[in-house]
Amino acid sequence: MSKLAAEFFGTFVLVFAGTGAIVIDGVSGGTVTHVGVALTFGLVVLAMIYTVGDVSGAHLNPAVTLGFFAAGRCGLGMVAGYIASQCLGATAASLLVHYLFPQSETLGITLPAGNAWQSFVLEAVLTFILMWVILSVSTGAKEKGITAGIAIGAVIGLEAMFAGPISGASMNPARSLGPALISMHFENLWIYLLAPILGACFAVAVCRLICPEGCCEPPWSARAGRGSDGSAETL
C-alpha cells in the first residue's frame, strides 16, 4: 500500500504542478511562459523522484510502468495497481485545479497543434527518448542512481520545451487522462494514451540491443523483475 500511495501522491503533485502552471499561465496573461511550464514539469519530476523514489521507484507514468514490465524490472502484479494509482492521482490533481480555477475550460489538457499523426509520432519518439534515459540511469553504479533524478527531470524539461508547442509533450497517459476526464475534453486523447506506451516499449527493445547484457530481461525470464538483491528494480 505504501508503494501505491507513493505513486498516487507523486503523480498528483506532478499533474497539479504541471497542469497548474499551464492554467495559471493562461489566466495570468502568460506570466509563467512556455519555458516556465517546461521547467515546472522537469523540476517537479526531479523532486518527486527524490521524494518517493525509494518507496515506489517513482514511475509516475503508466508508460514507464509498462516499460519497466517489458524490461523485466517489475512484476505483472505491480502493473495494474501502479497504473490505477497514477491515473487516480492525476484525476484528483485535475479536480483540485478545476476547483481553484473554474474559469479554465481545458485544465491543461494536451492537444495536437496540427496533424494528429504528427503529434502521435512526436509523442512516441519523445517517450522513447525518456524511457531509454530512465532505463539507462536506473541501473548500474550507485553514482548513476544518485543523479538519475537530474537526468530524467532534465530530459522531460528539454522535451517539453521544444515539443510542447506541437504535441503538448505529454509522454504520460495519466497526465493527459486526468485533465481530459475532469474537463470532458477527449479530442485526440487516443494519441496521448497509445503513443507513449509504444514509445516506451520500443525503448526497451533498443536498450536490449545496445546496453550491457542483463540490463533488460524479458518478463518471462527467470531473472526478470529482480535486482541484485532479489528485490523489484526501480529508479
Image (cartoon, rainbow, N blue to C red):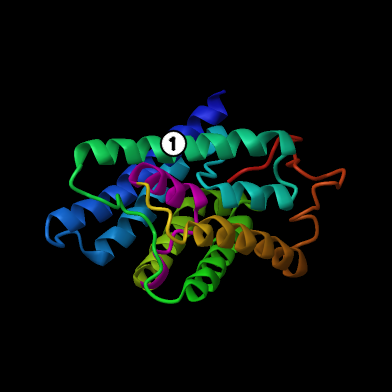
Rendering quarter of residue 162: bottom left
From the image, give the main secondary structure of the stretch colored magenta. Answer: helix
Report which residue position mark 1 lands on: 89
x 43%, y 33%: residue = 9
x 65%, y 53%: residue = 67
Q: Which segment is the magenta one?
A: 166-183
x 75%, y 62%: residue = 212
- Above or below: residue 48 compared with residue 165: above
x 83%, y 44%: residue = 223
Q: Position of residue 71 (x, y in %)?
A: 73, 53
Q: Position of residue 198 (x, y in %)?
A: 64, 62
Q: How many marks?
A: 1
- Residue at the extreme right: 222
- Above or below: residue 110 compared with residue 5: below
Task: Classify 10 Å Cα crowding around label 1: few (below 14), some (14-19), many (20 and above).
Answer: many
Q: Horizontally, is 144 left or right of 88 in the view?
A: right
Rendering quarter of residue 230: top right
Q: Horizontally, is 235 left or right of 180 in the view?
A: right
- Residue at the extreme left: 29
Evaluate whether residue 190 shows in this view.
Answer: yes
Evaluate whether residue 51 shows in this view.
Answer: no
**Residue 167 sits inside the magenta stretch:** yes
Q: Position of residue 122 (x, y in %)?
A: 50, 72
- The answer to which of 182 and 30 lies nearer the viewer is 182
| Amino acid type, residue under disc 1 in the picture | Gly
Which quadrant, please, contains the N terminus? top right
Q: Position of residue 23 (x, y in %)?
A: 24, 52
**Residue 36 sits inside the magenta stretch:** no
Query: Is label 1 in a helix, a strand or a loop?
Result: helix
- The answer to which of 197 and 215 lies nearer the viewer is 197
